[in-house]
Image (spheres, rainbow, N blue to C red):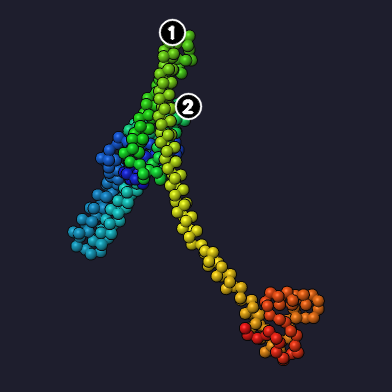
């Protein structure tokens, strides 16, 4: 994904890989589209890629002026492959401009030469004490806001303003590095002649940290509101899904008709089975045996089916047998 796509469709916070490992970056909201286009073109037209494309174009021109058919086809094929490979390589480099900042030990990434020119890294704020946690909260808060489903219901300019406020707060925090180092150095020797400077530097840094905490609190309040609206959206979706699912279930009338239809099936099957028994002279069923357990079972079945069981000799009709 290119930086341009990230500016228009995604979160301004995204993962990236640096020579010292993976990290998260927050893009500078003041970088214009023209600057991003310029960087994309510069990456795509890297010198050796440009020379390769130029060589491919020369091969294509040569293929057009050659008289020999075989040589012309060979030059044409080589030119097409060279130009296509160069274009694909340039596109690949441009597509990784936002996510891969590793360019070899001797070359530092152009976008990372000046801290804050194009983006800030979350690792830039490590080692600043409690302020490091506040910086991480700002990174995560901006990312959550831009990825929230509630963003579709918020003015895009308002989301951009949250991004800008978070960026400015991080820039203010970044400018306290020197003051923090000075305060720590002076605090190491409070009895020296410059000990009073440490007393003055420490409150200045504390005031900036307090202001940063207020910014973090306000952005957190924005997230509380968006999370509440997300919960409302989820509840609405679940309600609609539940209503649709329940409406597809069979109703009481349908279940009652189904039960009534199934109720007559055993008696009908019994009539056909006993008729088949009589026709084939297959003999009595086990429940028709004269033993007491069988008699009880026959009486129970007779009571259930409402059809009398009468023992007759084989080949003779029985009362209650036959088709209904």
Query: For numbered disc 2, what is the local secondary structure?
Result: helix
Marks 1 and 2, how far apart at CA: 29 Å
Taking depth in this image into account, of 79 and 285 the one nearest to the observer is 285
Q: Nearer the viewer, residue 115 or 213?
A: 213
Image quadrant containing the C terminus: bottom right
Q: Which disc is residue 130 wearing?
A: 2
Helix, strand or loop under label 1: loop
The residue wearing badge 1 is: 193
Residue ranking furthest to the bottom = 315
Residue located at (21% from left, 63% from top): 68
List x then y, in percent, for residue 81.
Answer: 30, 56
Q: What label does residue 42 carry, if any?
A: none
Question: Where residue 80 sits in the image (x, y, percent)?
Answer: 28, 57
Task: Please tell me whether residue 249 is drawn above or below residue 277 in the rendered image.
Answer: above
Residue 43, image x, y percentages: 31, 43
- Residue 300 visible (yes or no): yes
| Vertical relation: 320 (above or below) 74 | below
Q: Using the rendered image of the protein, determine whether residue 28 is visible from the camera's viewpoint.
A: no
Which callout, 1 or 2, points at the residue further toward the start of the chain?
A: 2
């Amino acid at each position: 994904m290119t930086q341009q796509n990230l500016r228009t469709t995604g979160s301004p916070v995204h993962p990236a890989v640096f020579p010292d490992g993976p990290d998260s970056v927050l893009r500078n909201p003041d970088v214009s589209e023209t600057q991003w286009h310029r960087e994309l073109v510069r990456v795509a037209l890297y010198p050796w890629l440009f020379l390769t494309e130029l060589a491919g174009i020369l091969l294509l021109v040569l293929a057009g002026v050659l008289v020999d058919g075989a040589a012309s086809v060979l030059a044409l094929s080589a030119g097409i492959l060279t130009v296509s490979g160069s274009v694909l390589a340039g596109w690949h480099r441009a597509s990784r401009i936002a996510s891969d900042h590793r360019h070899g030990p001797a070359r530092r990434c152009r976008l990372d030469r000046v801290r804050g020119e194009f983006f800030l890294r979350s690792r830039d704020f490590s080692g600043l004490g409690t302020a490091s946690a506040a910086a991480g909260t700002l990174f995560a808060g901006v990312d959550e806001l831009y990825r929230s489903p509630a963003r579709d219901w918020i003015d895009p300019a308002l989301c951009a303003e949250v991004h800008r406020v978070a960026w400015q707060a991080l820039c203010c925090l970044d400018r306290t590095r020197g003051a923090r180092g000075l305060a720590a150095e002076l605090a190491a020797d409070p009895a020296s002649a410059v000990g009073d400077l440490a007393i003055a530097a420490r409150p200045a840094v504390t005031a900036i940290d307090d202001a940063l905490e207020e910014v973090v609190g306000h952005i957190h309040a924005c997230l509380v509101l968006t999370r509440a609206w997300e919960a409302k959206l989820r509840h609405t979706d679940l309600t609609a899904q539940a209503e649709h699912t329940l409406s597809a279930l069979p109703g009481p009338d349908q279940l009652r008709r189904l039960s009534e239809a199934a109720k007559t099936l055993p008696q009908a099957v019994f009539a056909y089975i006993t008729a088949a028994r009589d026709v084939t002279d297959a003999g009595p069923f086990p429940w028709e045996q004269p033993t007491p357990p069988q008699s009880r079972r026959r009486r129970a079945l007779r009571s259930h089916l409402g059809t009398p069981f009468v023992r007759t000799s084989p080949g003779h009709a029985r009362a209650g047998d036959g088709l209904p």
